[in-house]
Image (tube, grey):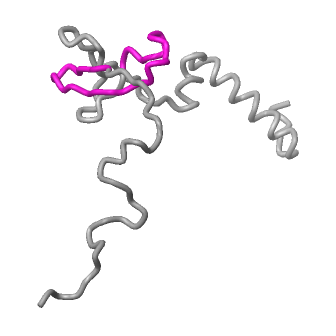
Amino acid sequence: MAQGGSAIRGSRVGSGPMGEMDHGVHAERILVRYWDALGNETVRYFSAEVADADIPEIIDCPVSGLPAGRDKDNPPSESRNEPYKTHLAYVKERRTDEEGEQLLQEALQKLRERRGTLKRSEK
């Protein structure tokens, strides 16, 4: 005797015939291939309606993290990233040590005048 069970086991509720090609309209698309310096290939799909100028020439490879371009024989080289600079580093680029010392002394004098702690000899 057959065991009891659902007659629709393995199928989704509300599903139609396998394939379901009649559901929705699939947009036309184009395939673009990118390669990084290690030879990794990445495929991206874009809408066929997108202008060629709007498709990026370089992307980041998801495998290596390196930049990847469309030319397999000449992939883009790894771009050199400048390290993060603090505000103080930018200030030091614009000012000499002498200018910095002068500005510091002026700021200290204004602070002392405001607080009333300026010595008689400093006036």
Residue 55 picture quarter: top left
Is 107 left or right of 24, judged from the image as shown? right
Question: Which segment is the magenta one?
Answer: 32-58
Q: Which is more toward the observer, 82 or 52? A: 52
Question: Which percent across, then down, holds residue 53?
Answer: 47, 10
97 to 1, vertically: above or below? above
Query: Which residue is found at the position 31% from the left and 65% from the top?
Result: 11
Is 31 left or right of 25, judged from the image as shown? left
Is 68 left or right of 112, judged from the image as shown? left
Quadrant containing the C terminus in the rendered view: top right
Quadrant containing the N terminus in the rendered view: bottom left
Query: Which residue is found at the position 82% from the left and 34% from the top?
Result: 110
Q: Is 42 covered by the magenta stretch?
A: yes
Query: Which residue is found at the position 41% from the left and 42% from the top?
Result: 22
Q: Which is more toward the observer, 18 or 93? A: 18
Query: Which residue is found at the position 63% from the left and 23% from the top?
Result: 100
Residue 114 picture quarter: top right
Is 9 left or right of 120, judged from the image as shown? left
101 to 14, vertically: above or below? above
Residue located farthest toward the front when viewing the structure as drawn: 1
Q: How many marks?
A: 0
Q: Which is more toward the observer, 122 or 54? A: 54
Residue 82 picture quarter: top left
